[in-house]
Image (cartoon, coloured by chain):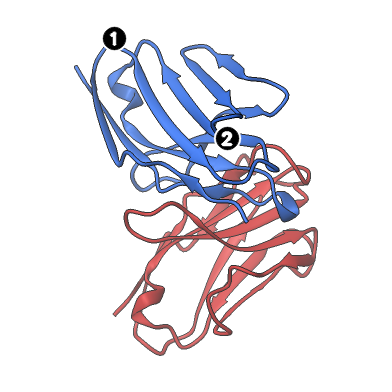
Amino acid sequence: DQQVKQNSPSLSVQEGRISILNCDYTNSMFDYFLWYKKYPAEGPTFLISISSIKDKNEDGRFTVFLNKSAKHLSLHIVPSQPGDSAVYFCANGGGSNYKLTFGKGTLLTVNP
Amino acid sequence: GAGVSQSPRYKVAKRGQDVALRCDPISGHVSLFWYQQALGQGPEFLTYFQNEAQLDKSGLPSDRFFAERPEGSVSTLKIQRTQQEDSAVYLCASRQYRTGEAFFGQGTRLTVV
């Protein structure tokens, strides 16, 4: 089975600086990951994904890095903006029926 | 519709009452998921449909939980004899194929009193 762990419940950064959100996983067979962003009272929205054939994927201010040997991935947001303040979930998209397995989330606060 | 729609947005149920939560996925999406999100936790998988077939219900916490998608489109999650521990946000997500990103609805917040 797959476990996805986000060990930092919260992160606070200054506007314009880099935000780095981390995620660890246990099962190397399922090397497809997604990041979701969630505002209060809304459902999670897809942000960016990465598969095992890559070690980096970039989309505008968002970059995800995958370190397969360490079973670790990270999301970088540069530059951070106050509107980025939300809960970020790391999710694994592998496994049976390709269901998404989520971490507990990290609350990012970007201060003006 | 433009996105995944869930209704009702909020539901308060008395303990022991039956509830039904509705999900309208994005038109044409093959895959449909239900998740349960408790306060301060990530979404936890409940069940998965591919078209009308329920291929995985391993996450349903008890036999009081039942889900269906009879025509491969709209889905209903039913909870019988609700208990306080059922209080959570129930999220529905759909995906165009078997893989790729999933699109979530806004969720139904269920409070059992």
Q: Is residue B22 above or below residue A65?
A: below
Residue flagged by tag 2: what amino acid is it? Leu
Q: Residues within 10 Å of mark 2 (few under 14, many from 20)?
A: many
Q: State the residue at coordinates (68%, 29%).
A: A51
Residue flagged by tag 1: what amino acid is it? Gly
Q: Give the labeled residue for mark 1.
A: A16
The numbered mark, 1 or 2, whose residue comes first in the sequence reads 1
- Chain in red, by letter, is B
- Spot occupied by residue A106 in the image (x, y as percentages of width and height): 35, 38
Chain letter for the residue marked with disc 2 in the picture: A
- Which mark identifies residue A34? 2
- Spot occupied by residue A88 in the image (x, y as percentages of width and height): 41, 36
Quarter location, residue A52: top right
- Spot occupied by residue B90 in the image (x, y as percentages of width and height): 48, 61
Quarter location, residue B15: bottom left
Q: CA distance from mark 1 to mark 2?
A: 24 Å
Nearest the viewer among B41 and B27 is B41
> Which structural element holds mark 1?
loop
> Which structural element holds mark 2?
strand
Image hue for chain A: blue
Nearest the viewer among A16 and B77 is A16
- Spot occupied by residue B29 in the image (x, y as percentages of width and height): 75, 47
